Amino acid sequence: MDIAVGPTNFNAEQIKKNKIKSISIIIVDKPDGTLIIDKGASKGYEFDENGNIKRYYFTVLNRTQSEEIEVPAIKKKGRIIRPARTRTETKYLNDTIFINVFYDAKNRIITKRVRSGDYYDAYYYEYNEQGQIKKEMHCKETNVSENKKEFKMGVQNVLSSETFEYTTLTPTQIKKRCLNDEGREYKKAIINYDIKGNKLSETYEFMVSWMRQETTYQYDFNEKLLKKAYQSNESGEVKTFSIFEYASKNEALITETKFKDNVLTDEINYLYDETNTLVKSEVNRDHKNSSIGIVKYFYTFY
């Protein structure tokens, strides 16, 4: 999506143009009929001067803890108008996941390292001459640096290694073969593009399980994404799709509507700053859980 900031995607050119150094995001929830609940959920992103994400984090709810709070009596003119009582207060205890991202000279991601507790999940990427990912390796690693903000390789165990082969079938269609660490093909895909290079569809088929996944994309005449649809038979037939709406003046994304099996699940509205380029907040109407998620964005700049 061609916006400076989106829910999961960032346009590096717009981040660079606006000289954004970091974005902090705070998330609260308001169930219908109750007060706002702050579970301490947050996200954060740091960017280099080229607009690429170099580090980000997010919180994951670990557990809840309840405790009884003594509420004193309320008196007015010497009379007790509300007796003392106790109330239950719930505390939300979160874990924070940190991810560092590293790039090559062509601004392609070559390493992602995820820290959760004492271990790291690392993902390494290699590219072919066309800039397509030809290899992905997933490792479990330890950090022996005394400064935990720095990484010094300790023990590395390779968990999986995948390679990818591409065949150009037509100027707008590519076949992709996915091979496991034994060199056996376990999944294949057909990827279609329009003449402008926008992805129209990608269909994956698994060789053994007969599972199938398909994602399709629709665009307007300005190459803005209008609809993204996904279907899979991995665990029963599942179909989801999202519809995107943009402002007529500046073409900024203003609404994203999500459906699952043709049932409306979420309506997300984006609010921008006075320049209409940076997302200031978003409001997500969660129909499934009968609540409203409120997200606030805070920026720092170079």
Image (spheres, grey):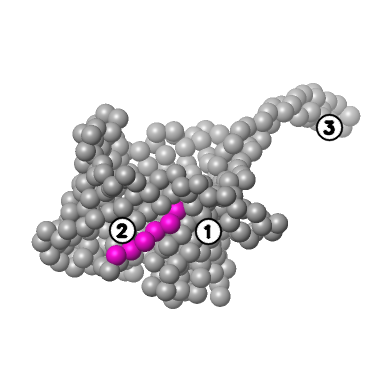
CA separation in Å, label 1 and label 2? 21 Å
Q: SS for tag 1?
A: strand
Q: Nearer the viewer, mark 3 or mark 1?
A: 1
Amino acid under disc 3: Lys
Residue located 61% across and 59% down the image: 152
Q: Residues within 10 Å of mark 3 (few under 14, many from 20)?
A: few
Residue 247: quadrant of the picture: bottom left
User: Does residue 292 lie above or below 256 as drawn?
Assistant: above
Alpha carbon separation for disc pair 3 and 2: 75 Å
Pointer 1 residue: 100
Give the labeled residue for mark 2.
134
Residue 285 occupies which quadrant of the picture?
top left
Q: Which residue is drawn at 31% across and 53% down?
A: 163
**Alpha-carbon distance for marks 3 and 1?**
57 Å
88 horizontally vs 109: left or right:
right
Q: Residue 76 carries which label?
A: 3
Q: Which amino acid does label 1 sit on?
A: Asn
In the picture, the quarter occupied by the C terminus is: bottom right
Q: Residue 169 at what x, y percent from top left?
A: 11, 58
Q: Which one is nearer the viewer's eye here, 121 or 29?
A: 121
Q: Position of 222 compared to 29: left or right?
A: left
Does residue 36 appear anywhere in the picture?
no
Q: Decide which of tag 3 and tag 2 comes sooner along the chain.
A: 3
